[in-house]
Image: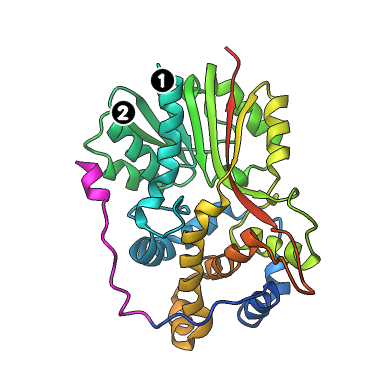
Amino acid sequence: MQMAAEASSETDLNDLPPPAPAPVTLAEAIAMIDRQFGVEKLLADAGKQVVEPYYRQSVLVYEQFYEKYLSVPGCMHFGLNPDGQFSRDGFYGQARGVRTTIRNMGNVKRVLEVGCGKGLNTIRLAGTHPDISFTGLDLLEEHVHKATARSTDLPNARFVQGTFEPIPKPLRGADLIFGVETLCYAQDLDAVCQGIADSLTPGGRLVIFDCFREDGKGPVSDQMRLATRLLEVGWGVPAGYRSAEEWSAALQRAGLKMNWVHDETQNAMPSVRKLQGFAMRFFGDWKVRMQSRILPDLGRRNAVTAILMPLLFEGQPDGPDATAPGVSYMRLVARKPA
């Protein structure tokens, strides 16, 4: 069964150099990024539409590094470890959250995942809900091919190539739509929210797991805003992250009602700390940087996002550079009135 194939044991890290010490402050992290990439050079790409080339150029990063050393096969998102201890089981946390919504709704017949990547979440859910039809929609044809190949034993799962701006009309009529770390790429927030609302059946639900700009935890320093912009450039988020409040307002303008906004940041911390440790091998060992030259430019920028994430999620509570977090990781659940 596919579920068994997804299980992954810890990989031996002996073939990697030990990680360098992680940066303690944003200033240290930004200085490291500046030395290796050039901050001004990175910022010159701010706002550019590079979503598709970013994922194409990051294939080796995800498959040969992220999946091999940190996550699980087919995974392209953070893990969620509520107990605060890193384990690879955490990378199924988003699927568990969607499963909870399915269980709470009852009578779900059709589920659509937007930006499904290589199908990890859709495959996981289809394997435990054989009576529900699951569709994964992704921008890249390569992702669709890989997801389809991994789900040959699941007749209730299919994958199609396309964008969620807008959701294709043949995919409308879903009882539940979800997106994991993908709706942040929305260019026109109101148009995307309206398209989701139009694609849901009455009483249907939307579940979003994603990064959101943090405006509510205190003053954010200029340095934190710079780090947030570098994160957006590193991941090719052209319009920048919006706050959960902006998303909630747009969803309500589209006629949806907010059910739940839940901060998952602390649950994501174990995996982003682990990821930062991996990135420090790049910043701390010249041999790793030389080897990374085989990667395209956008693929190498994953080192930028990885080194920044824990600092962006936690902020700096003390000292002359004290700042609230710049980004949070949240789960949003909205409902279409019956």
Report if the CB atoms under discs 2 and 1 are less than 8 Å apart.
yes
- Quadrant for residue 223, please give it: bottom right
* Percent position of residue 205, x then y: 53, 25
Q: Label 2, label 1: how many angstroms apart (C-alpha)? A: 10 Å
Dot 1 amino acid type: Val
- The answer to whether one can see residue 207 in this image is yes
Label 1 sits on residue: 108
Q: Which residue is mark 2?
A: 129
Placement of 319 over or under 45, stated as above or below: below
Write the start and end of the magenta stretch as one range.
1-16
Q: Amino acid at mark 2?
A: His
Using the rendered image of the protein, determine whether residue 142 is visible from the camera's viewpoint: no
Quadrant position of residue 261: top right
The vertical placement of 183 against 53, above or below, is above
Mark 1 nearby-residue class (10 Å; few <14, some 14–19, many ≥20): some
Quadrant occupied by the C terminus = top right
Viewer-side residue, 302 vs 6: 6
